[in-house]
Image: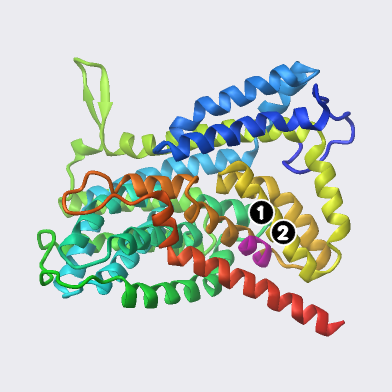
Amino acid sequence: MTQVGTRDDAKQDLTFHGGWLGALVPFAVFIGGVSWLGLSGAPDETGFGPVLLVALGIGVLLAQDRERYADAVIDGMSHRLVMLLILAWLLAGVLGVVLRESGLVQSLIWVASVSGVRGGGFVVACFLITSVFATATGTSLGTLLVCAPLLYPAAAQLGADPAFTIGAILAGATFGDNVSPISDTTIASATTQDADLGGVVRSRMRYALPAAALSVLVFGFSGGEDGSAPATALVAPDAVGLLMLTVPALVLGLLLRRSHLVVGLFAGIGFGIALGLLLGRFAPGDLLSIDQENFIASGILLDGMRRAFGVSIFTILLMGLVGGLEASGLLSRVIHWMERRAREGAGAEWWIFGSISAATMLTTHSAVAILTVGPLAKSVGEGAGVDGYRRANILDVAVCTYPFLLPFFIPTILAASLTAGIDGMPSMSAWQAGVHNLHSWGLLAVLLVSIAARSREARISR
């Protein structure tokens, strides 16, 4: 099986009616459909599945050898890394629900509210709480679904600016997605560059922490409103729930010690369930229960797995679409063209950044963009002496900007949808949520400055 972005010279390129334009038509259908659904308020990846099926069907019609196109789609879906991501999503989904049901978020909110924070201070607290939860669970969308309904309504009581509040919640989800060792983008960026997860996470802090510090400063100074009531406790006192922070700490510790991702996630789930049962946060029957009359199973384990179904199907279908485009040889020709022009380190970094930016816009999916560009980044970067950690960080930092800033990506759309219908609080648009996500703006600035500095050093050395 060939990797995304590589070329199998033993086979001729798959041809399409209309040439290379015909090869791009399925992707154009996908982008147009996703953009329309996104701007219409589609809440998650589930609604994008039919668009992908239509795009794949059009690919079958346009391919001159339909059997080969079908095989190429299956090959694209069956990459080993895709299967790793799906298993990680399933396990991380279970871990996230275990932490949610344990009351961890409520405990964090209680600590923030009783500490007397209000206005900009509460906006900063929103950023920190969501950063902790997103880092612990590795999911930005799950963080938004759990934290936004709890934190956003509280802004009315604590004098926090609504736009900055939802921006801070989205920013915290971005932070965790960028640095968590169980995030799909962290896994994809490290694996495609043959870099260990622990080293990638440690090296990524030099980008994430400056952006986070800048975000905290602006949120603190600009996130307040005048004339609000004094801060009060927003939830029932619950310090015991803070003990659940030991669960993500265990997972992080194992992964930093280079344990296998799957091993670390299973360890976290097992420890989280045991600790939650010991603390009385949930009962054994809450984990899995069977309704024999209606033939229905429910519980924490199933709830966690269901959270991964939508993104898993979306990713599998999208990788199939990429596989069909790869079989046309168009990606290979683009990659070879770029490799010929990226001869020295600084130039290579700009090429990697430009490629991952274009792929993110094209696919609207961060992990798939990394899977698509990863082989190019590795080939170009290694040839120019760019180490694996640096390559992985350029890929991951870039994909944690646009999807969390622009109004036709899932994270901004979801964040905006969670502000609707709340008494005393205005509904925010996807554009407003993205504009006020200061962490993603900071990440983009830090990355561009870093690449520019490397470029300047290379010119001086010559």
**Which quadrant of the figure has residue 402?**
bottom right
Q: Position of residue 313 (x, y in %)?
A: 51, 31
Front position in the image: 311 or 301: 311
In the rendered image, which residue does mark 2 sit on?
Answer: 352
Residue under numbered circle 1? 356
**Cα distance between the residues tagged 2 and 1:** 6 Å
Query: Can residue 321 be seen?
Result: yes
Element assignment for label 1: helix
Inspect the magenta stretch and tell me whether residue 457 lies in it.
no
> What range is drawn magenta here?
389-394
Mark yes or no: residue 95 visible.
no
At label 1, the amino acid type is: Ile
The amino acid type, in three-letter code, at marker 2 is Ile
Which residue is pictured at 42% across the width and 72% down the height? 215
Q: Is residue 233 left or right of residue 382?
A: left
Given residues 229 and 151, the one toward you in this image is: 229
- Left or right of 327 in this view: 416: left
Principal secondary structure, stretch drawn in magenta: helix
Whether 213 is drawn above or below 130: the answer is: below
Q: Residue at x 16, y 49 (%)?
A: 423
